[in-house]
């Protein structure tokens, strides 16, 4: 993105956050289990903290998924290299050898009846 577009987008987001904070400045207490409670904090901080913690949680999940996918890609790349090496070795086989093997297999697949019919 262009630097000026990034600046304008950041400015818009900052203005939205400031207006959100001004409109949601009501003091709020959070009540926990076992009769624990927090000191009074502005409502926008509670909401923004929840958003931030959610974003961190999603980022951690995404991080593990990326690591898993990188491992899979690494395994697939290794398999591709092995197959490419096999392909190169097969391409380098002499043509005569592969043709003579093909003729031998054709003679074997025709069966003994063909040879017997030629002899008579």
Image (cartoon, grey):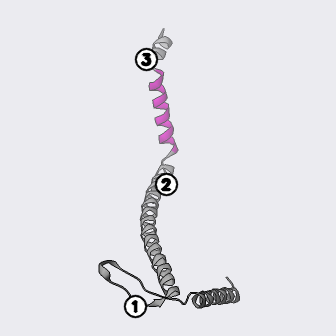
Q: Is residue 109 magenta?
A: yes
What residue sits 51% from the left and 83% below the top? 48
Numbered tag placed on residue 39 in the rendering: 1
Left or right position of 69 against 24: left
Vertical arrangement, residue 104 with respect to residue 37, above or below: above
Q: Secondary structure at mark 1?
A: loop
Residue 47 on image: x %, y %: 50, 82
Query: Residue 112 shows which numbered tag?
Result: 3
Between residue 27 and residue 14, name the one nearer to us: 27
Is 96 magenta? The answer is yes
Q: CA distance from mark 3 to mark 2?
A: 37 Å
Q: Earlier in the sequence, mark 1 or mark 3?
A: 1
Q: CA distance from mark 1 to mark 3?
A: 97 Å
Q: Position of residue 37 (x, y in %)?
A: 36, 85
Counting residues from the start of the chain, the first of labels 3 and 2 encountered is 2
* Disc 1 + disc 3, Cβ < 8 Å: no
Q: Residue furthest left?
A: 34
Give the class, few, some or many, for how many residues have Cα within 10 Å of label 2's Cα (few <14, many ≥20).
Answer: few
The residue that label 2 is drawn on is: 88
Residue at (67, 88) in percent of width and height: 3
Q: Give the image quarter of residue 72.
A: bottom left
Tell whether 117 sits left or right of 10.
Answer: left
Provide residue 22's location: percent of width, then percent of height. 59, 91
Q: Picture coordinates of residue 75 (x, y %)?
A: 42, 61
To which quarter of the image does residue 74 belong? bottom left
Nearest the camera: 73 or 115? 73
- Label of residue 12 in the image: none
Q: Earlier in the sequence, mark 1 or mark 2?
A: 1
Q: Which residues are magenta?
A: 95-110
Element marked by disc 3: helix
């Amino acid at each position: 993105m262009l630097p000026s577009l990034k600046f304008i987008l950041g400015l818009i987001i900052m203005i939205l956050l400031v207006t959100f904070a001004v409109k949601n400045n009501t003091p709020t207490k959070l009540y926990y289990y076992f009769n624990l409670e927090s000191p009074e904090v502005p409502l926008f901080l509670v909401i923004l903290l929840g958003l931030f913690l959610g974003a961190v949680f999603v980022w951690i999940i995404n991080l593990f998924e990326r690591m898993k996918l990188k491992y899979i890609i690494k395994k697939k790349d290794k398999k591709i290299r092995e197959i490419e090496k096999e392909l190169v070795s097969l391409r380098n086989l002499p043509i005569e050898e592969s043709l003579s093997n093909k003729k031998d297999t054709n003679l074997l697949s025709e069966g003994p009846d063909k040879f017997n019919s030629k002899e008579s």
